Image (cartoon, helix red, strand yellow):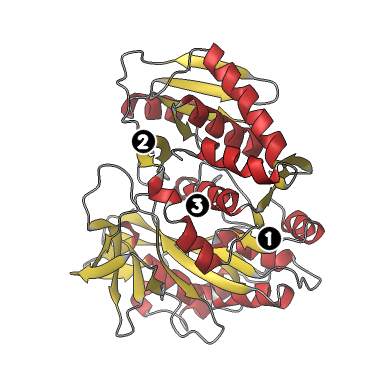
Amino acid sequence: MKNYYELLVQQCGVKADKLMLDCDGESFTYGSLLELVDRLAISASEKGITSYKPILIIAEGPVYQVGAFLALEKLGAVPILMHQDCTSDVVETIMQENNIYGMWQVGAMQNNFLLLDEAVADHYPWEVMGALTSGSTGVPKVLYRSFESWADFFQEQNRVFCVDADTVMFLHGSMSFTGNLNMFMSVLAAGGSVITCRRISGNYWNMLIMRNYATHIYMVPAKLQILGRAAMAENPYVRQIIAGSQLISLKAQQFLRKTFTRADIILYYGTSELNYISYKHLKLDDTDSRNLGKPFDGVKVKSVNGDLYVDTRYHVSGVKIPYCCGDTGYINDDGEIIFNGRKTDWINKGGYKISCLKLEQQIRNMDCVKDVAVMPFDDATRGQDIAAFVVTDGHTDSKKFRHDVGEYVDERERPKKLIFLEMLPLNDRGKINKEALRELL
């Protein structure tokens, strides 16, 4: 087996009539998903898409994202799913800076291919896909992967996350988010089912989870907070809640456990350049929310001068192992990773270093706070100062909040700018949209 299309074909041979994907009530068995993929592959071939060329996919929703991705896998091309919230200018820059052969726009009412650069060289046969970085610190870059860099790890991650043929996984968001795409493919490899939707609504998510008897939920913590606050009735069917990309607050855990009473909540740590690195089964009596647990089998982590280095064979093409992805932290006496945030998530306030991650956790502990994001901004006197974007329960005035926050943070760590929002803006990957927040400063 050399790609994910062949994985789908293999599963169709034994479970063609089993549900594989449901998006907003539109259902696909393994067999009917393969039929959709084959139709899209024929169309792509007719438009001139050939093997080994990197193709940017702009697709309408999860169904066409997955369908187009697998169709290009069938043709031997190199699919790259485009983030759905990028402007046309950003898309153009991505194509230019990442040397893209062509762009395929596909959906229920569109099917267009634009050849961008015929001179783009063929990729290596083992590079079967590309994935975009988040772009939070610049233009998203394309990272290329072999089939084995994910597929060979499915057995281990499915063991930890208890994913098997009986799994019904609910996930939300764009498949351009590598976490979503990886989880989809791991469920495909196990012979399970995936439930998803396009709407952002905690009530709607809960309805789909209950209606489809979902056994697993995979979401970033920002979305789990929405889900937990909207949940009402007890749900005894969900066995696993899997989250990554951000830390989960104690309050978010409490909300989730009130509804998903039998669920094990697992926080994992991973990066786009690598794969899954570590995991932790969360408990309400955990004393340090920065604890990311122990590495997965086959992965080694060390801290050098406060920077985390990872030794793993499950990585994108072209990286040097052990790899430092810009995250800071240390390994405690129990072999667990204590995360101190990304290098870019520190504020230098007149020489005093402040961790945005730690400050967010402290402010989030306030009774009135539902969510918070902390960012630096340029200050003429101190070089940088602190801005906090806060979502409260609606009963807090700014003067009282400024006073109360002093009980949770050091005097030098009080935010100079305080901006109250009804909800933190999220991108299509479910992560906090920092560019949108910067525009509010």
Secondary structure under the numbered disc 2 in the rendered image: strand
Count neighbours of disc 1 (C-alpha within 10 A) and say few if under 14, some if 14 to 19, many if 20 or more.
some
User: Label 2 amino acid?
Assistant: Glu
Residue extending furthest front?
Answer: 14
- The label shown at residue 166 is 1
Residue type at tag 1: Asp
The mark closer to the camera, 2 or 3, is 2
Q: Give residue 179's mark.
A: 3
Give the labeled residue for mark 2.
127
Please tell me which residue lies in front, 177 or 86.
Answer: 177
- Residue at the spot 59% in from the left edge and 57% down from the top edge: 421
- CA gap, disc 2 and disc 1: 31 Å
Q: Are marks 2 and 3 in contact (CB under 8 Å)?
A: no
Residue 286 placed where, x, y %?
49, 84
Percent x, y of residue 155: 48, 59
Q: Position of residue 213 (x, y in %)?
A: 77, 61
Mark 2 or 1: in front is: 1
Q: CA distance from mark 2 to mark 3?
A: 19 Å
Q: Is residue 116 above or below residue 264?
A: above
**Tag 3: Cα neighbours inside 10 Å, few (<14), some, or many (≥20)?**
many
Instruction: Tell me what residue is drawn at x 51 percent, y 53 percent.
Output: 431
Going by the picture, which residue comes out furthest to the left? 305
Q: Is residue 425 visible?
A: no
Does the rendering let one see residue 5? yes
Vertical order, 7 against 102 (above or below): below
- Name the residue located 68 percent from the left edge and 71 percent from the top edge: 395
Q: Secondary structure at mark 1?
A: loop
Q: CA distance from mark 3 to mark 1?
A: 21 Å
Closer to us: 293 or 373: 293
In x, y percent, where is residue 321? 22, 55
